[in-house]
Image: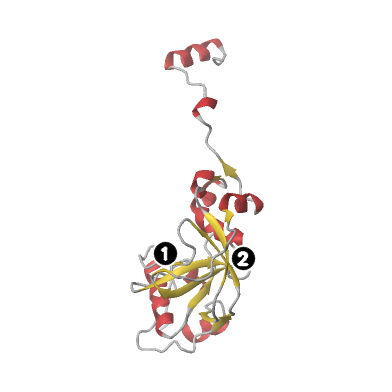
């Protein structure tokens, strides 16, 4: 019987628990490859809370990085950027962007290939599907021996995937750090994001309701 669905129905299905995914398409991440992370805590943090797309459950976790600094910052400010085209500078308060070198070679699952679609039923929905479904795929790739996945970040439309999610033990990894991380606000401005800062109280004129009514009647605003 033919499978019929609406075009806007989710087509991606969970991985088959009875199937091996060792031959899933992969991409080699070479030792020394440079990636970027926008972070408030340590840059090599592997999350296991389930709050992000490919989070693995403890004792494993997932570290999210990007192939360029702009993509890393957009993942931090994406909802505000998508809603208004503006980014409150306060969202990036205390956020740094580190330029990180991968300490060892890693095999990444590569869903963005025709082979992944033809042999494993993969779709581009892996980049936008509900988190529980994406996390099922992350667990399947982890069981198959992959060290992570190359994927399309949500807030950076691009021809090539800009996201790298690495798998490993949950928590902070003692890998090499960037000795001179940049402020995320500097990266944001350099990559064309429009930052806005709310005015301070000193810059505001506060009037009473009665002053407002009087000013409207008289066609003026109080100084």
Tag 1 and tag 2, C-beta contact below 8 Å: no
Q: Residue furthest left?
A: 58
Image x and y of residue 185, in percent: 58, 49
Q: Could you tell me which secondary element the residue under label 2 belongs to? A: loop
Crowding at dot 2, Cα within 10 Å, few <14 / some 14-19 / many 20+, comes out as: few
Task: Identify which residue is drawn at 53% across, 84% down.
Answer: 25
Q: Residue at x 63, y 69 (%)?
A: 159
Q: Which residue is mark 2?
A: 158
Q: Position of residue 146 (x, y in %)?
A: 47, 82
Q: Find residue 30 and report its horizontal and vertical position in percent.
A: 59, 80
Residue furthest to the front: 179
Side (left or right) of 11 relative to 74 = left
Q: Is residue 156 above or below residue 108?
A: above
Task: Locate residue 99 relative to residue 19 in the image: left or right.
Answer: right
Q: Which residue is mark 1?
A: 52
Quarter of the image with the N terminus in it:
bottom left
Crowdedness of circle 1 by 10 Å Cα count: few (<14), some, many (20+)?
Answer: some
């Amino acid at each position: 019987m033919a499978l019929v669905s609406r075009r806007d129905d989710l087509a991606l299905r969970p991985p088959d628990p009875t199937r091996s995914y060792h031959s899933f398409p992969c991409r080699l991440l070479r030792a020394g490859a440079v990636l970027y992370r926008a972070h408030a805590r340590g840059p090599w943090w592997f999350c296991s809370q389930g709050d992000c797309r490919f989070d693995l459950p403890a004792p494993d976790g997932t570290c999210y990085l990007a192939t360029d600094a702009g993509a890393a910052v957009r993942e931090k400010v994406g909802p505000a950027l998508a809603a208004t085209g503006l980014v409150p500078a306060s969202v990036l308060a205390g956020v740094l962007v580190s330029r990180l070198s991968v300490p060892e070679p890693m095999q990444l699952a590569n869903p963005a290939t025709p082979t992944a679609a033809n042999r494993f039923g993969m779709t581009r929905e892996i980049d936008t599907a509900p988190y529980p479904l994406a996390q099922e795929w992350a667990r399947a790739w982890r069981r198959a021996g992959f060290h992570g996945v190359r994927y399309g970040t949500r807030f950076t439309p691009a021809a090539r995937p800009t996201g790298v999610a690495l798998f490993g033990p949950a928590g902070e990894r003692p890998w090499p750090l960037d000795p001179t991380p940049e402020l995320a606000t500097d990266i944001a401005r350099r990559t064309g994001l429009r930052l806005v800062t709310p005015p301070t109280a000193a810059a505001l004129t506060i009037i009473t309701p009665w002053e407002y009514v009087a000013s409207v009647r008289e066609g003026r605003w109080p100084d």
